[in-house]
């Protein structure tokens, strides 16, 4: 099993540094709209990161199944978009239960920065870790999102 | 020039009209951002003699130059206006995300003038700017307001708002954004006077640094430097109160019971070394901070069960703890929550209650006048109860909601002898009788007694900082020039939007590299300090124009007449001679008149006249 991003809401301080460096690393500019992960702050108790789980948490491969032109594939455990095939229809964005599939000219999403995730490097609190997938942690985030 | 949009949004609530003013590189070179922008706007746009609660008062908000860019601890936002508490120009800096979001909406600053006809909130979504009805939000808390607005506009809008205290024009009402506050000087009351309950922003525009690769490298470098420093553990485990034991026991300058003592004998009970392991369930951070000093403090049982705050900060351990003689950390946490929810500055609120408690102790106030028993001995219950009354302006809380200066005048009977303030601002948690230069800084601070305008407690307590070594905290010698220089230093900090807890990592010379990578503009250390001096002079000039002169700067009687009674700083006092000598030195260093007016030569040199 390849390593994945694993969120730890109980460690998240809500500083949003990960959002900024994610978009800076990928796009050379800062915009949380372009960040491949999101920090939600709901109340004084609740800050949590929402990351792409590469369909491990979804189980039924929501975005992969939703794509009408088969532009989204799982390659070596990583959910990958073929930008040449993508028609920007938005089906995958609607399907993603975590809201981390983004859309501009084509769909785009977390690619784990090629195996050295920038968000993890910048989180000294360990609120996002790069390790064996942990379904229990993904479920925590899913419940927090449902409560929103 | 990168990073800036070149636009300032100016909103007139009376007319429900807005305009966009353009700014260029020259403006940035002159004022830098953050506090520099906010102070420039209010300095130039508030008519002379304006009442702080009148429609003509201007409130400005500006993200620091770094805010929105990933630099650890560099996400601060400045607010400024004329203060209803001090009558001076007040700026207050918060760690909330609202300024960065304004930048994503395409504006480098926001200026608000006028008064909305009815309770309203400002909604900004990129080019869409609306004044919306806030009838449903009026009377709601700083926790309910963002909740309701996010239900309406979506989870990702950013909200800055006031609580009931701001609506009721409590003199030290604050502005809240995500449990972070622009706390001091009554900016929340200024919003309340404008019928402005909240500012709601969603921005989708890019922020483009001049050199993205270098910025990422700098961010990682400083994040590691901070993570490897000893202060990382102190911040992340104990928060800003970590040095409480040291200040109290070794230095003896922790003001207690309205400054009647300077050692709190029950300090252990409110020390983070006691409570962090018992009540803290996780760390909380300002926007863009990777070394969080905020703490999620939760009480699960006992009479204060249900309390959940981002706190308690060092200053609050003083104001809702020692200043009120309160050794119950649970009660202090409840007090902190009341202040947060109603939207009040914890420092002024707690210090004002401590003042009232001393008046009761001396028989100047009776239980009947106060409407309850309000003493140092029963503060555990009385302090939170009185905070509720102050935030809602109920009963005697209405008097205390004015702060110590105005409340002491209203109470009379010699109460002014016990009102501890400069320029109407209640001081924070450093007894300046044992640190002379910091005493000078309480006087020269343009918003009244403040630990952060010069941050001079640190050089004096440690004995060295930056350009200076062997600093003697008991000596007035050389303090005039040092305090003036530190004020300029801090104006630069508040203009780039860096946390002052980072001043050991980023001395001014380190900032030039970061500014260049973000904006593409080169500055020298001297040029940055000159901007800091310009910002401070605008504030000083504004204050003098509004009639706040040397006589209003002076230290209160307790600091001049009552020596510290016990502990390591026993016998310490600032004599009137020391006070006047330091003030004279300071005025000379500033090239201001003895009365506190910036001279025409100085204003000309700074391109302000």
Image (cartoon, rainbow, N blue to C red):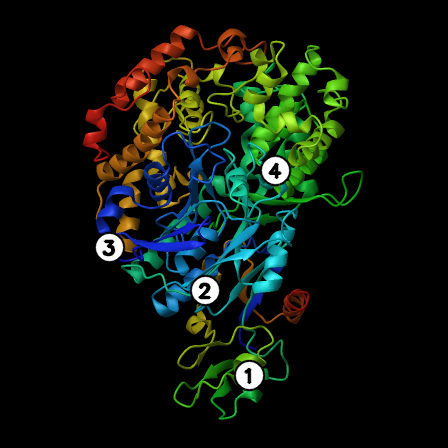
- Would you place residue B127 above or below residue B477 in this image? below
* Residue underneath mark 4: B168
- Residue B471 at x, y = what percent? 37, 20
User: Dot 1, how many residues are within 10 Å of its Cα: few (below 14), some (14-19), or many (20+)?
Assistant: many
Q: What residue appears at the point 66 percent right and 30 percent down from the top-left corner?
A: B270
Q: Who is closer to the viewer here, B388 or B328?
A: B388
Q: CA distance from mark 4 to mark 3?
A: 45 Å
* Residue underneath mark 3: B520
- Counting residues from the start of the chain, the first of labels 4 and 3 encountered is 4
Q: Chain for mark 3? A: B
- Would you place residue B490 above or below residue B21 in this image? above
- Would you place residue B198 above or below residue B380 in this image? below
Query: Residue A54's quadrant in the figure?
Result: bottom right
Dots 1 and 3 on the same chain: no
Dots 4 and 3 on the same chain: yes
- Residue B107 at x, y = what percent? 37, 56
- For the C terminus of chain B, give its image quadrant: top left
Q: Chain for mark 1? A: A
* Residue underneath mark 1: A63
Q: Chain for mark 4? A: B
**For discs 2 and 4, the disc positioned in front in the rendered view:** 4
In contact (CB < 8 Å): disc 2 and disc 4: no
């Amino acid at each position: 099993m390849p390593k994945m991003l694993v969120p730890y809401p109980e460690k998240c301080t809500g500083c949003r540094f990960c959002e900024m460096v994610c978009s800076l690393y990928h796009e050379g500019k800062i915009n949380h709209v372009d960040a491949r992960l999101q920090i939600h702050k709901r109340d004084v108790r609740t800050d949590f990161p929402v990351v792409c789980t590469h369909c491990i948490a979804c189980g039924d491969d929501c975005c992969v199944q939703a794509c009408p032109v088969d532009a989204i594939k799982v390659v070596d455990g990583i959910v990958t978009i073929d930008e040449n095939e993508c028609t920007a229809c938005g089906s995958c964005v609607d399907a993603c239960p975590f809201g981390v599939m983004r859309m501009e000219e084509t769909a785009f999403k977390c690619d784990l920065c090629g195996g050295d995730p920038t968000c993890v490097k910048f989180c000294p609190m360990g609120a996002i870790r790069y390790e064996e997938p942990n379904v229990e942690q993904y479920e925590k985030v899913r419940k927090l999102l449902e409560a929103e | 020039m990168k990073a800036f949009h070149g636009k300032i949004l100016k909103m007139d609530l009376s007319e429900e009209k807005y305009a966009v003013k353009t700014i260029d590189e020259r403006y940035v070179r002159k004022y830098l951002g953050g506090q520099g922008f906010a102070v420039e706007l209010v300095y130039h746009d508030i008519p002379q003699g304006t009442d702080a609660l009148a429609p003509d008062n201007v409130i400005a908000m500006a993200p620091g130059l770094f805010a929105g860019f990933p630099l650890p601890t560099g996400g601060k936002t400045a607010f400024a206006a004329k203060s209803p508490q001090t009558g001076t120009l007040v700026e207050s800096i918060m760690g909330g995300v609202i300024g960065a979001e304004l930048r994503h909406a395409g504006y480098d600053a926001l200026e608000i003038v006028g008064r909305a006809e009815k309770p309203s909130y400002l909604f900004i979504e990129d080019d869409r700017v609306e004044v919306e009805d806030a009838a449903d939000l009026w009377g709601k808390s700083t926790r309910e307001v963002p909740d309701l607005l996010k239900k309406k506009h979506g989870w990702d809008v950013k909200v800055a708002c006031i609580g009931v205290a701001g609506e009721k024009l409590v003199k030290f009402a604050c502005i809240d954004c995500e449990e972070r506050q622009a706390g001091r000087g009554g900016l929340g009351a200024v919003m309340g006077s404008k019928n402005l309950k909240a500012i709601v922003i969603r921005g989708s525009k890019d922020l483009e640094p001049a050199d993205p690769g270098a910025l990422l490298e700098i961010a990682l470098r400083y994040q590691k430097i901070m993570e490897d420093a000893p202060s990382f553990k102190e911040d992340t485990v104990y928060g800003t109160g970590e040095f409480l034991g040291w200040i109290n026991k070794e230095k003896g300058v922790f003001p207690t019971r309205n400054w009647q003592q300077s050692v709190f004998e029950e300090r252990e009970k409110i020390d983070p070394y006691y409570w962090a392991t018992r009540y803290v369930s996780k760390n909380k951070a300002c926007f863009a901070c990777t070394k969080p000093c905020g703490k999620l403090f939760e009480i699960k049982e006992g009479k204060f069960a249900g309390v959940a705050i981002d706190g308690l900060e060092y200053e609050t351990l003083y104001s809702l703890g020692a200043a009120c003689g309160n050794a119950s950390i649970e009660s202090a946490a409840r007090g902190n929550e009341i202040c947060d929810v109603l939207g009040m500055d914890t420092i002024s609120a707690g210090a004002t209650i401590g003042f009232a408690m001393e008046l009761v102790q001396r028989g100047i106030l009776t239980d009947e006048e106060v409407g309850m028993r309000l003493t140092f001995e029963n503060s555990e219950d009385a302090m939170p109860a009185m905070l509720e009354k102050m935030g809602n302006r109920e009963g005697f809380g209405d008097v205390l909601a004015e702060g110590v200066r105005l409340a002491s005048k209203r109470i009379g009977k010699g109460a002014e002898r016990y009102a501890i303030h400069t320029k109407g601002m209640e001081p924070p948690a450093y007894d300046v009788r044992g640190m002379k230069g910091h005493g000078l800084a309480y006087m020269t601070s343009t918003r009244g007694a403040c630990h952060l305008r010069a941050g001079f407690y640190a050089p004096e307590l440690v004995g060295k900082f930056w350009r200076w070594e062997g600093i003697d905290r008991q000596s007035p010698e050389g303090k005039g020039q040092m305090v003036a220089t530190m004020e300029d230093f801090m104006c630069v900090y508040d203009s780039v939007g860096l946390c002052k807890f980072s001043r050991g990592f980023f001395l001014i010379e380190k900032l030039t590299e970061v500014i260049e990578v973000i904006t593409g503009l080169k500055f020298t250390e001297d040029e940055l300090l000159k901007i800091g001096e310009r910002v401070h002079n605008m504030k000083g000039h504004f204050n003098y124009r509004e009639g706040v002169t040397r006589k209003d700067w002076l230290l209160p009687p307790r600091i001049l007449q009552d020596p510290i009674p016990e502990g390591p700083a026993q016998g310490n006092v600032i004599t009137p001679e020391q006070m006047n000598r330091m003030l004279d030195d300071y005025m000379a260093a500033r090239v201001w008149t003895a009365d506190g007016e910036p001279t025409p030569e100085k204003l000309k040199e700074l391109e302000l006249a």
